[in-house]
Amino acid sequence: PGAIHLMNGLYDAKYDKTPMVALVANVPTPRQDINFFQAFDETPWFRDVAVWVHQAKTKEALPVLMDTAIRQAYAKKGPAVLVIP
């Protein structure tokens, strides 16, 4: 999946202590548990590199999650990852 190409940049930000927010796309929520092509749970995959990682469950949660991601990136000086189905 394309998210793998993001890892080098995230590790650079982590070790440089650079706040950043990465938005990662995932398959639509209804298709996540049916072995959809190139689908996997990306949240645990980013835990080592990100200061904060979360997957949105609803579109209504996006404003709060984006605000939290930005605050965490600045507070902890590193990359935050928000996965959006």
Image (cartoon, rainbow, N blue to C red):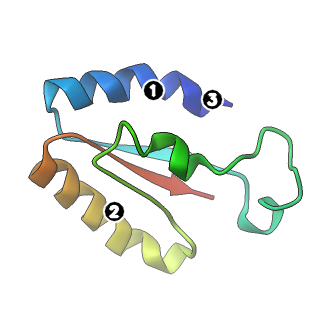
Q: Secondary structure at mark 2?
A: helix
Chain-order first, disc 2 or disc 1: 1
Q: Secondary structure at mark 3?
A: helix
Q: Give, as a three-letter code, the residue at label 1.
A: Met
- Left or right for 65, reference 79: right
Tell me, yes or no, whether the two marked residues, 2 and 3, touch with CB atoms within 8 Å: no
Tell me, yes or no, whether the two marked residues, 2 and 1, touch with CB atoms within 8 Å: no
Q: Residue furthest bottom?
A: 60
Residue visible at 42% across and 46% down? 47
Q: Quadrant of the C terminus?
A: bottom right
Q: Which residue is mark 3?
A: 2
- The percent position of residue 62, horizontal first and vertical second, equals 43, 69
Q: Which residue is mark 2?
A: 66
Chain-order first, disc 2 or disc 3: 3
- Quadrant for residue 69, please give it: bottom left
- The percent position of residue 61, horizontal first and vertical second, equals 45, 77
Residue visible at 39% across and 39% down? 48
Q: Is residue 21 above or below residue 15?
A: below
